[in-house]
Amino acid sequence: MFLKTLLIENNGSIIRKIRFNKGVNLIVDETSQEEKKTSGNNVGKTTALRLIDYCLGSDGKNIYTDPEFKKKTNQVVENFLKENNIIITLTLSTDLNNEDEREIVIRRNFFMDKKNTILEVNGEKIAKKDLQSHLKKIFFNSSAVKPTFRQIISKNIRDDKARLTNTIKVLHPTTKSEEYEALYFFWFGIDLDSAEEKQKLLAQKTIEENLQKRLKKDSSISQVIQSLIVINDNIKNLEESKANFNINENYEYEINRLNEVKLNINRSNTELSRLTLRKDLIEESVSELNEEFANIDVEKIDKLYKEAKALMPFLQKTFEETLKFHNGMLEEKKKFISSDLPELNLKIETINAQIDKLLKEESLLTSSLIKSGKLEDLQDIIYSLNNAYEQKGALEEQKRLWEKSNDTLEKIVNKLDEIDNDIHSLNDKLQEKIAIFNKYFSKMSERLYGEKFVLSADIGEKGYELNITSLFNNPGTGRKKGEMAAFDLAYIQFADAVDIDCLHFVLQDQIENTHDNQITSLFTDIVKSVNCQYILSVLKDKLPSDINIDELEVLKLSQHDKLFRI
């Protein structure tokens, strides 16, 4: 799928219409060095890339973030987008040279209220929550929950810190290994149906392991079993002693019933403790997540971010954005973890009612037995029996908790092993695909640097990992950009060769950090050999002098003609 046009409208009036071509497409900032000193460098070249990303499902907030002051938004742009009916229309096509080929048209505006919100795909209104799954079905013919559409296309849109510094680890820094595993397999044409289930099982495994840590503070399963043996022997001896007393039938019944009631009270209390413990664990997990919600005074780190920008001018994400993204992920975890709380509260309420009823019966039986008169020795035996049965009940409940937890954990581990075995059974298929990919990747990197890069898939503790090896273990920023370009372009060649659905375009910012030789090679030779679009936002005066910019540019911007013309 190729980008065809990007249209920016204000109430039907065209602000910009950008037509994309195969090969290199440059969005050029023509601002001179002298103008930058007096007026800054915010003309919208990176924003153009982010408008494309917005149509492909981003939240769009990075569109009006001020590039100089990361903690603030560009109020002029933000107000312009939100207070006017600014509609962004992205048109994609399977073949730019054939008007009859299938097209995908995505339209979005920036109004926040549902009534005026525009979010359409091929004329069909789409709910915001359904956009990712809808686009994944259209672009990749997949209905699987994991990986998400945004994860899949993350390497095609390199405009933020993670994707501008990492070739493969292109997701948020908090992303877990199992999510990367699902993504890597998908990239290489292997859809893991078990990806979502594996992630849920790992979360459940963590909860169960925390429960066992709590249980172990009281006693181990072995201690419980051995204690039960001793208690049962004690009860047997006490029952034999009690049997030697000549007790009337009614008295015997009341004694037995009293023991039964006490045992039931103890079991109910133990069950209540178990449920309360599980509830506390869940609430503790939620509390821990709440504590993870970053609540940092961003004013205090303003100086730090300014210093960071001085060292790394390509920083694209604000601290608040990272903070909000992090907190959003934590909120989803909270919903998942706390889903059992309503049922637990209902069970606790029911057991409390049962205990109240049993306590009333215990009181009546005790009164009746006191009135009937008892031998002192018999009372001592009965007292010891009651204590023994209470201890037995508590130990039996502990044993039941341990056995249930062990059984649950065993089932989770077995299911995870089964899933991992299924995934590992795909190893040959994955290695075969990566071998094909490396044919293109090594050639591409050799053309750029005279050195062959190699991708490998290795099984780590938490799943598969992808690694790139080269002679230079710590490439500089410019070399890293070249590595990304080689990877992204080689992937398109690979996907076409093995018939995997992919996006045939790459959006990239800050290519100027790459050495002139590699830029020239990319622009004049390498990109032409790939069935793709390489769309770059660039500073004109940073490009090599031997590049014919006029032939490659699709949009010119300057301090006098900014993207939104405001």
Image (spheres, rainbow, N blue to C red):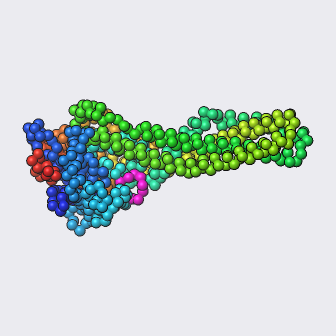
Q: Residue at x 53, y 50 (%)?
A: 342
Query: Count the marks: how many?
Result: 0
Residue that protrudes farthest toward the right in the picture? 246
**Left or right: 13 in relation to 470:** left
Examine the residues drawn in magenta and state their main secondary structure. loop
Q: Which residues are the magenta region?
A: 142-149
Q: Position of residue 148 (x, y in %)?
A: 38, 52
Res. 48 visible in picture: no
Q: Position of residue 90 (x, y in %)?
A: 24, 58
Q: Is residue 228 above or below residue 23?
A: above
Question: Which of these two is toward me, 73 or 485?
Answer: 73
Q: Residue at x 13, y 52 (%)?
A: 565
Q: Residue at x 15, y 46 (%)?
A: 43
Q: Is residue 90 above or below residue 364?
A: below
Residue 262 in which image quadrant: top right
| Residue 368 belongs to the span the image colors magenta | no
Q: Is residue 500 above or below residue 511?
A: below
Q: Which image quadrant: the N terminus?
A: bottom left
Q: Position of residue 496 (x, y in %)?
A: 31, 56
Residue 477 in which image quadrant: top left
Res. 231 visible in picture: yes
**Left or right: 566 in relation to 224:** left
| Residue 148 belongs to the span the image colors magenta | yes
Question: Which of these two is toward me, 80 or 488?
Answer: 80
Q: Residue at x 30, y 61 (%)?
A: 115
Q: Position of residue 220 (x, y in %)?
A: 64, 35
Residue that protrudes farthest toward the bottom in the picture? 100
Residue 140 in which image quadrant: bottom left
Question: Which of these two is toward me, 509 or 445?
Answer: 509
